[in-house]
Amino acid sequence: MNKLLHNNTLFTLTLLGIATALAFLFFSFVSENTANIALLYIIAQILIARYTNGYLHGLFSSIFSVICINFFFTYPFFRLNFTLSGYPVTFIGMLIITLLTTATTSRLKKQTEILAKQEKQVQIARQESLRANLLRAVSHDLRTPLTSIIGTTSSLLSDDSILSDAEKRELLENIENDSSWLLNMVENLLSVTRINDTVTHQVNKTPEIVEEVVAEAVQRLKKRFPSASIIVHVPTDYLLIPMDAILIEQVLINLLENALIHSGSSHSPELTVTDHPDHVTFCVKDFGHGLNPDVIPDIFSGICHNTGSVDSHKGMGIGLSICKTIIDAHNGYIEAKNHTNGALFLFTLPKEEEENIPCSQK
C-alpha cells in the first residue's frame, strides 16, 4: 500500500513538473496568452486522474495547477492574487474537470477489475471442466488395456492353461501393444502437465522450424509403427513459427496415430502443411470410414463415444482432447470433419504469439 502511494505521488509530481516546465517554455515565447498554459495543466490533471488511485492526487494537482498559473503566469508575476477577475471561475472549472475525470476513471478501473476477475473465474471453470473430462476419459481408456494385460498375464501364469508357443507369443504381443499404448497415454498426460504447470495455462513458445518439427513427429511415430507409411507435404519455403515443439509433435503423433489405427484403411494417411499470411495450417487426412457425424461436435471433449464408429476406439477421445488443449494454449484453432474419402483433422498455429487466428480453410 505504501509503495503504491509512493508511486502515485512520484507520478503526480513528475507530471506536474513536466507541465510546469512546458508552461515556462511556452510563456517565454507567448507571454500574453495564458489560456494555453492552463490547457497544459488540464492535460496533466487528466493523466494523473487516469493513472493514479483515488481522488487525493487529482485534487492536489488541481490546487497546484491553479496556484502555479496564478503565481508564475498571471500578472503581477511571482505573487498570489486571488482577487483577479475570473480567477474563481478558473479554479472551480479546473476542480470540476479533475473530479469528473477522477470519478470516471475510478469507475472504469473498477469495471476493468471486475471483468478481469470474471475472466479469471471463466478460465478456472474451463480448466476444471478440462480436468473432469480428462479424468472421465482416463478412467475409461485405461481400464481396457489394463484389464487386457491382467487377463493375459493370468492366462500365461495359470497352471491349468495349456498354450502353444504361437499362442503364448500372440498373448505376449498383446501385452506389448497394450503397454506401448499405456506409455503413449502417459506421454499425453505429461503434455497436459506442461501447460497446467504455467500460471496462465499458456505454453513457452520459441521459434521452431516447421519442417523439423514435422520430421521429428513422423520419426517418433515410426518407432512405434515401423511399417507405417505417411505421405508428408511441407512448403519449400523456410517456415519459422513460435511454438512448444514437444507439444506440437505430440499433437501430430496423436492425429497421425488415429489416422493409422482408427481409419480402417490401408491407404497411407497424408500430412499437409500450408503457409498463410498470418498462420500455418496442419492437415492430417486419412482415407477410411470417416467420422460419425453425430459425434463430430463433441469429438474434442475427451469423452469416448461408444457408438461403434471408428472414432470410438480406445484412446482417441483423450488424445483428441489433449490435442485441443495444446492448440488452444498456442492460441490456435483445431477442427475435425469428413472429406470425400475419409476423415480430416486440421489445426492452425498463428505466426504471431499474441494473435488468435480463426481458420476456415477446408
Image (cartoon, rainbow, N blue to C red):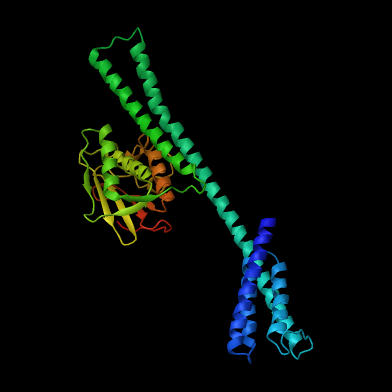
Pinpoint residue 25: horizontal percent, then vertical percent.
59, 82
The residue sitting at 41% across, 56% down in the picture is 353
Q: Nearer the viewer, residue 50 or 271?
A: 50
When the figure is inspected, residue 125 is found, relative to residue 313, above or below; the finding is below
Q: Residue at x 36, y 33 (%)?
A: 184
Quarter holding the N terminus is: bottom right
Residue 278 percent coordinates (x, y) = 34, 61
Location of residue 277 with respect to 233 vertically, above or below: below
Left or right of 294 in this view: 339: left
- Position of residue 350 relative to residue 76, above or below, is above
**Residue with the most extreme top position:** 159
**Residue 55, position in %: x, y?**
71, 68
Q: Dividing the image into 4 quarters, which one contains the C terminus? A: bottom left
Q: Residue at x 21, y 54 (%)?
A: 236
Residue at (56% x, 54% y) in the render: 119
Tag count in the figure?
Answer: 0
* Snapshot quadrant of residue 227: top left
Left or right: 12 with respect to 229?
A: right
Q: Is residue 161 above or below residue 352?
A: above
Residue 305 appears in view? no
Query: Residue 266 vs residue 75: left or right?
Result: left
